[in-house]
């Protein structure tokens, strides 16, 4: 059996036109054409008419109230200053009240929503405790209490009695005590213990008793329907009887027979009292209030109280008989019995929790006027977008760091290249072969074009041919300076103080210095020539190998491996006889782990793209609009909204942690494979082949680099000797000119000597002057104190010979580009 439950009366209203004031505000506040939103405004108007006109107590009526309340909330946030005449009637007195604020409209809608929710809960069939009806009824009354809480907390200045704080508090208590009554019914149906049932029933009885006293008080601020007061008084007595009955059964089971007997007597009295109150005068209230209590309430309560009377009377007779025959204890007075503890289990379900349910959100649908967004909301949305961008950048940087760490680890472990060392463990892999690297093969292809060695031998052999000619010219120039020095000193001895010509050491200092510098440069160039020749002799055979082409190089590599293998044959004692199967399994596991590790960046990239997609689809304009009136809500709201990305971010962190574990596992596996005896033969074979290939690669690379260096050196030498030959000829010519001019300066002294006395030396001098004059190629007048201008001597580059002092000369053309590497 189930007890009758009270529901809230529904408030009536008059029609109101919302289209005109909303159209005016769209034009003035948002500067948009209202005709653009004509369809949306019509839907809003129709939603109100549907919500207030449907008086049916079904879920469809409740859903329409939910939907219209959501619309009103969004309209209030967009048009807080809208003035419309909302006319509602008091739910109990039916008094007409008129207001022009959205808050009043919202409060009335929420009141009717609570009434619909409670009505639906009261209609649930609670006979079967295993069905969901009890749960829906229990949740419905808690939701109604939460809706009344919302009105009480947000609508402080109520123009009607039914919306005032005391009224709402009393109605909230009524909703919660009925939810507790439903929970008590389920507890009894489930066969729970008498002590627990007594505590739950004690709370229900006390709450109904308090409501009966409150509603009977003359100072009560609102008029309660008579039948409500009659029902709560009856229920207070009924649940008091139930409380004492189950407490008595618990005491009897605990051996407290006297207390149990007293409680059975009290329960019997309360049950009979409740049975006498089961007549409810519904005819005395207004018609719209009669719907708040089922017409079968009298018969339902009569059946409940009669059943309780029967159970209590039977238990009392049995307790008295047992006490008379067995216990002989004196029952205490009812007033001296200890009060029974109360247990409250019903709490309100807040409106935020109610509207956040997925089913309710789906029923509410999207915001109708999405195109009308206040400027402050747009600014907040822009700030939120920046926070999203910061989050995405931080996650992208973290994932990039993870990828860099993975690449560094693979590079340090030389994976997967180092696994080639153990490829012989797998039967389908051929034995390792010693082959040149791609770079060596490319070099061999380049050098195979022409007969490199023959050309280089010819050019190196002809490198020093111009040296003798240059050396002879420089020696001739130095000899001419020495001749002038002897003649000058001879004349000085002959004429004594009358001889005023400068000594050759002073007059020819610059020329002699240039000749010496040229000879030093020539000696340095010869040293460089010898170094080039020696370098070419060292690498000639290797360059010859490269010039024969890639096939010849590959053959040389194979022969080197065979020669090395013949020199270090493995003995039977050193042979490895360990089983290779474990090593092979370990190698396969490492290959699998490496592939999984290399695939991890793409997996994280997919997660990052998923995060970016979620960010692009995330629009909190509606949430910002709902919280528009809350000051400084952005930091808290942004943190809550960004928290929706926490699961995906945690997946990324877990993925990075998994990567680190895989790297550590690979490091350990490689160490075990390198030490595994089953892989020793394969490892030694590969090491020998690989080391031979590396040695030959390095050798041939050094040979090619030396070949390029020799080519560059020969080109520089050719340029040097070409310039040196020209410069040496200039120095020789300048020395001849210098000697001729100096002899011309000494001519007066020779003339004087010839007029005074004839000597063989003068004759010899004159004959020499004539010979030099014959060699002279057009001398020009010079100062007697100045030497001829020295010619410029070629300055070899740093890579060929050290630089020495010389005048500027023309820059030679760059050397030919060596063959492509």
Image: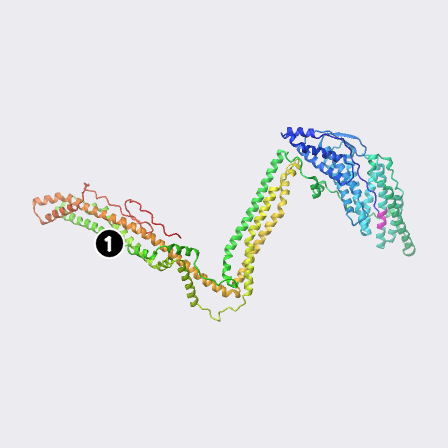
- Type of secondary structure dominating the magenta stretch: helix
Can you give x and y, in whole percent of width and height, for residue 465 in the image?
26, 54
Q: In the current view of this chain or complex, which residue is farthest to the bottom?
A: 573
697 vs 776, left or right, is: right
Q: Can residue 656 be seen in the rendering of this structure?
A: yes
Q: Can residue 801 be seen in the rendering of this structure?
A: no
Q: Nearer the viewer, residue 251 or 718?
A: 718
Q: Which residue is mark 1?
A: 468
Can you give x and y, in whole percent of width and height, for residue 559 in the image?
41, 64
Q: Nearer the viewer, residue 713 or 57?
A: 57
Can you give x and y, in whole percent of width and height, for residue 658 in the image?
58, 54
Q: Nearer the viewer, residue 83 or 520?
A: 83
Q: Quadrant of residue 160?
A: top right
662 vs 337, left or right, is: left
Q: Residue at x 33, y 59 (%)?
A: 537
Does residue 733 show up magenta in the picture?
no
Number of marks: 1
698 vs 657, left or right, is: left
Q: Nearer the viewer, residue 758 or 653?
A: 653
Q: Label 1, secondary structure: give it.
A: helix
Give the class, few, some or many, for how many residues have Cα within 10 Å of label 1's Cα (few <14, many ≥20).
few
Can you give x and y, in whole percent of width and height, for residue 654 in the image?
60, 51
Q: Quadrant of residue 15?
A: top right
Above or below, 34 against 415 in this view is above
Q: Which residues are magenta?
A: 241-247
Color encoding of the figure: rainbow
Q: Quadrant of residue 613?
A: top right
């Amino acid at each position: 059996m189930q007890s009758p439950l009270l529901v809230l009366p529904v408030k009536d209203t008059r029609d109101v036109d919302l289209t005109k004031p909303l159209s005016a505000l769209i034009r003035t506040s948002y500067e948009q054409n209202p005709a653009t939103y004509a369809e949306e405004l019509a839907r809003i108007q129709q939603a109100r008419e549907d919500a207030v006109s449907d008086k049916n107590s079904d879920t469809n009526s409740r859903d329409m109230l939910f939907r219209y309340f959501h619309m009103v909330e969004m309209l209030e946030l967009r048009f807080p200053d809208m003035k419309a005449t909302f006319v509602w009637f008091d739910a109990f007195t039916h008094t007409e009240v008129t207001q022009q604020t959205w808050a009043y409209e919202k409060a009335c809608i929420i009141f009717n929503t609570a009434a619909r929710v409670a009505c639906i809960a009261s209609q649930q069939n609670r006979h079967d405790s295993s069905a969901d009806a009890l749960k829906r009824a229990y949740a419905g009354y808690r939701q109604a209490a939460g809706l009344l809480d919302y009105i009480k907390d947000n609508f402080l200045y109520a123009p009607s009695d039914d919306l005032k704080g005391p009224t709402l508090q009393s109605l909230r208590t009524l909703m919660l005590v009925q939810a507790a009554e439903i929970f008590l019914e389920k507890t009894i149906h489930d066969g729970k213990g008498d002590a627990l049932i007594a505590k739950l029933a004690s709370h229900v009885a006390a709450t109904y008793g308090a409501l009966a006293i409150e509603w009977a008080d003359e100072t009560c601020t609102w008029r309660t329907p008579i039948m409500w007061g009659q029902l709560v008084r009856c229920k207070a007595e009924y649940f008091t009887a139930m409380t004492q009955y189950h407490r008595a059964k618990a005491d009897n089971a605990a051996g407290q027979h006297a207390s149990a007997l007293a409680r059975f007597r009290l329960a019997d009295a309360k049950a009979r009292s409740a049975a006498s109150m089961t007549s409810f005068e519904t005819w005395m209230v207004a018609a719209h209030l009669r719907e708040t209590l089922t017409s079968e309430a009298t018969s339902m309560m009569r059946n409940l109280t009669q059943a309780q009377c029967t159970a209590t009377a039977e238990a009392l007779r049995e307790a008295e008989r047992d006490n008379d025959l067995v216990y002989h204890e004196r029952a205490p007075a009812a007033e001296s019995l200890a009060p029974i503890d109360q247990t409250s289990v019903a709490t309100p379900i807040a409106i935020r929790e109610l509207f956040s349910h997925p089913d309710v959100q789906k029923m509410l649908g999207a915001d109708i006027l999405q195109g009308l967004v206040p400027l402050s909301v747009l600014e907040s949305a822009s700030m939120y977008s920046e926070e999203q961008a910061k989050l995405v950048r931080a996650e992208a940087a973290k994932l990039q760091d993870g990828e860099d760490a993975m690449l560094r680890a693979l590079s340090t472990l030389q994976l997967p290249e180092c696994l080639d060392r153990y490829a012989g463990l797998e039967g389908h892999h051929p034995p390792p072969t010693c082959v040149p690297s791609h770079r060596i093969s490319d070099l061999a292809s380049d050098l195979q074009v022409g007969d490199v060695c023959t050309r280089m031998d010819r050019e190196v052999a002809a490198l020093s041919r111009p040296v003798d000619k240059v050396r002879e010219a420089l020696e001739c120039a130095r000899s001419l300076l020495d001749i002038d020095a002897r003649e000058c000193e001879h004349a000085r001895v002959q004429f004594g103080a009358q001889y005023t010509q400068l000594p050759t050491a002073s007059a020819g200092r610059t020329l002699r210095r240039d000749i010496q510098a040229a000879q030093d440069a020539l000696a340095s160039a010869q040293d460089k020539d010898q170094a080039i020749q020696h370098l070419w002799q060292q690498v000639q055979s290797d360059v010859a190998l490269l010039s024969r082409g890639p096939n010849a190089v590959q053959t040389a590599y194979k022969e080197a491996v065979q020669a090395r293998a013949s020199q270090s044959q493995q003995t039977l004692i050193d042979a490895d006889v360990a089983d290779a199967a474990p090593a092979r399994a370990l190698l396969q596991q490492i290959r699998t782990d490496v592939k999984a590790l290399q695939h991890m960046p793409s997996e994280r990239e997919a997660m990052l793209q998923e995060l970016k997609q979620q960010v692009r689809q995330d629009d909190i304009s509606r949430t910002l609009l709902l919280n528009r009136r809350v000051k400084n809500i952005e930091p808290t709201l942004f943190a809550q909204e960004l928290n929706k990305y926490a699961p995906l971010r945690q997946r990324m962190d877990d993925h990075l942690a998994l990567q680190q574990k895989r790297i550590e596992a690979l490091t350990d596996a490689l160490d075990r494979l390198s030490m595994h005896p089953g892989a020793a033969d394969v490892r030694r074979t590969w090491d020998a082949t690989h080391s031979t290939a590396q040695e030959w690669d390095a050798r041939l690379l050094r040979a090619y680099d030396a070949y390029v260096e020799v080519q560059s050196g020969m080109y520089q030498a050719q340029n040097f000797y070409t310039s040196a030959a020209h410069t040496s000829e200039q120095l020789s010519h300048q020395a001849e000119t210098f000697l001729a001019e100096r002899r011309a300066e000494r001519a007066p002294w020779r003339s004087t000597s010839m007029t005074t006395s004839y000597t063989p030396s003068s004759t010899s001098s004159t004959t020499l002057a004539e010979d030099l004059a014959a060699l002279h190629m057009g001398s020009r007048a010079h100062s007697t104190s100045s030497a001829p201008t020295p010619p410029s001597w070629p300055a070899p580059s740093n890579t060929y010979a050290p630089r020495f002092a010389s005048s500027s000369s023309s820059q030679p053309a760059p050397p030919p580009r060596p063959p492509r590497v």
